[in-house]
Image (cartoon, rainbow, N blue to C red):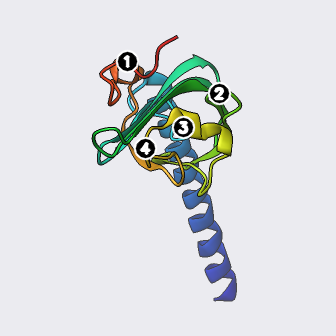
Amino acid sequence: MLAALLLAGCERSTEASDDAAAGRALEAAALDAGIVADPADAVGVYAAGEDRVCMARIAPDRYRIGVSVDYGAGQRCIAHGTARGRATLDVDLGAGCRVKVSHDGDRLSFPAQTPAKCAPLCQGRAALDALTVDRLSGAGGEAARLRGADGALLCTD
C-alpha cells in the first residue's frame, strides 16, 4: 500500500512539472509574439491624477523618460531625461538631478526625497518627491505621444 501511495505522488509531481513547463513555454511565446507585455519592461505610459510619466525605449533596458507633475496654475514639474535598468531604474533628468526609481512592472515610485538639484525642474510648491504612478499602457507609441502639463511631448529627444 505504501509503495502505491509513493508511486501516485511521483506521477502527480511529474504532471505538475509538465504543466509548469507548458505554462512557461506559453508565456514565452505570448511575450515573443507581443500579445502580452514583459512586466520587467518599463516602456509605457504611467499616471496618477494629473501626474504623468512616459518611458520610451532607446535600447534594451535603456529608456527616454518624461515626467509631468501638475498641481495647478504655477505648481508643476516638467522633466526629461534617460533611465536605465529594470526593477530599479537609474534616472538622469539633467542638471545633476539623478534618482533611483523603483519599477515593479505596474508602478513607478520615485524616492520620498529627491536631491536638491531636482528642484529647478519644478515651479511653486510642486516636487518630484514620492511621485508614484501606475502603468496605464505598455505601448511605446502611446509613450511617444504623451504630453505634459505644458502641452509639449514628454518623451522627446
Amino acid on which disc 3 is placed: Ala
Q: Nearer the viewer, residue 150 or 28?
A: 150
Residue receiving disc 4: 124
Front tag of 2 and 4 = 4
Q: Is residue 110 visible?
A: yes
N-term-proximal mark, 4 vs 1: 4
Classify 10 Å Cα crowding around label 3: few (below 14), some (14-19), many (20 and above). Answer: few
Which residue, given by chain and number where applicable, does mark 1 sit on?
A: 153
Q: Amino acid at mark 1?
A: Leu
Give me the C-alpha separation between circle 2 and circle 4: 33 Å
Looking at the image, is mark 2 or mark 4 earlier in the sequence?
A: 2
**Residue 52: x %, y % from top left:** 38, 37
Q: Amino acid at mark 4?
A: Gly
**Which residue does the image show at 32% across and 31% down from the upper left?**
149
Q: Of circles 1 and 3, which is in front?
A: 1
**Vertical order, 10 against 62 (above or below):** below
**Disc 2: CA contacts within 10 A as few (<14), some (14-19) or many (>=20):** some
Residue holding disc 3: 25
Q: Is residue 157 left or right of residue 52?
A: right
- Is residue 52 positioned above or below 58 on the image? below
